[in-house]
Amino acid sequence: MSIKLWGQLGVVYLFLTLKAIESTAIMNCNMKKELPITKIVEKACPAVITVAALKDMSKIDSSNSFPFNRLSKDGENKKNKTKIGGGSGFLFSKEGMIITSSHVVSNSEADYWVVLEPKIKCPAKILSRDPITDIAILKIEGDNFPFLDLGDSSKLELGEQVIAIGNPLGEFHDTVSAGIVSGLSRLITARSRFSEKTTRLKGLIQTDAAINPGNSGGPLIDREGKVVGINTALVFGGQNLGFAIPINYAKKDIEEIRIYGRIKRPFLGIKYIILNKEIAEQNMLPVSDGALVIRERLGEEAVIPSSAAQRAGLKEFDIIMEIDNQKITENNYLSDILESSKIGDKIILKVLRQKKIIEVQLKLEERK
């Protein structure tokens, strides 16, 4: 073999070696830089907080672990506050911005306090509640708080290791559990521990990391130390069945708050339940699909006063069958249809009222 041929082979070998090095470098750049769990927890725990829901009571239980009694100038109790609920949450900015679950702060008559450490508590302002995604954003006064970085939940893979942090029962601070991503894009119907209200949540992350009552609103963290989910629900009676809301759902809410100071969502203005065959048979209804306009509890309105629905003439016990020719079913919720609509859109509802089909037109307004 001539020297010239050997030289050519050497050039080819060098070229292939460089390409292999380049490919390896690209693979290394794309791979997640996994951190030891102990390091992740060390950084994350100071940013994980407890959210306490407090309400005026005529008496307060002296054994309550959250005695947030307000004092008047003369030192006597002006109002008694007792803990009626709560959950977890986490700081995502040094300015005191907090993410938690919407159902954790759902009581409009309660005051909300954040417990940064067992002996450090401060009032929280609710900037937004989004019951459709079960996400709420709070703000506490101050600066230079520890905070967690938000990751990209769209890049999660089955089997990937994740860490859940929260404060179960409001007592066991900085409880850590580890597991894997057991499923993606799950759909569940969750029921609040404090009311009979149910919420349909879609696109959830399923994990076998232990999520306990009181963990709602806490972070689900990947091995890079970034938040990929918001712990929201567990299945009672099931083993290792926990669910988290993808963090990408919260990013849109955060951006809207930064631009508008609030979340902007189209609002119809009704209370309703989605029908199925079982509900229809139990209540002798003529159809098994659609959204039945009905109040959730005594003392409230099924059609919200001064809402678009009221102005359009919707009534309790109406069944909304379609919106803009899209049928409402258990697989296509009314909220799913509205999610793709915008404030100011004019929509046409096909409504069943007393065995007659009518059409109702209305203009979607912003949720107040």
Image (cartoon, rainbow, N blue to C red):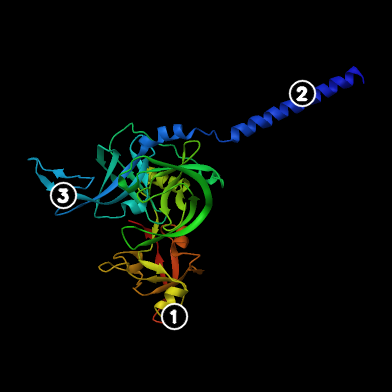
Residues under labels 3 and 1: Cα distance? 50 Å
Residues under labels 1 and 2: Cα distance? 77 Å
Q: What's under tag 1, amino acid-wise?
A: Pro
Residue of label 3: 80
The residue lying furthest to the bottom in this view is 355
Compare residues 110 and 43 and report the one nearer the observer: 43
- Circles 3 and 1, Cβ within 8 Å, touching? The answer is no
Q: x%, y% of residue 31?
A: 59, 35
Label ID, residue 14? 2
The residue lying furthest to the right in this view is 1
Residue at the (69%, 27%) spot, across then down = 21
* First along the sequence among labels 1 and 2: 2
Vertical order, 141 against 264 (above or below): above
Vertical order, 81 against 27 (above or below): below
Q: x%, y% of residue 351?
A: 42, 74
Query: Which quadrant: the N terminus?
Result: top right
* First along the sequence among labels 3 and 1: 3
Q: Nearer the viewer, mark 3 or mark 1?
A: 3
Q: What's under tag 3, amino acid-wise?
A: Asn
SS of the residue at dot 3? loop
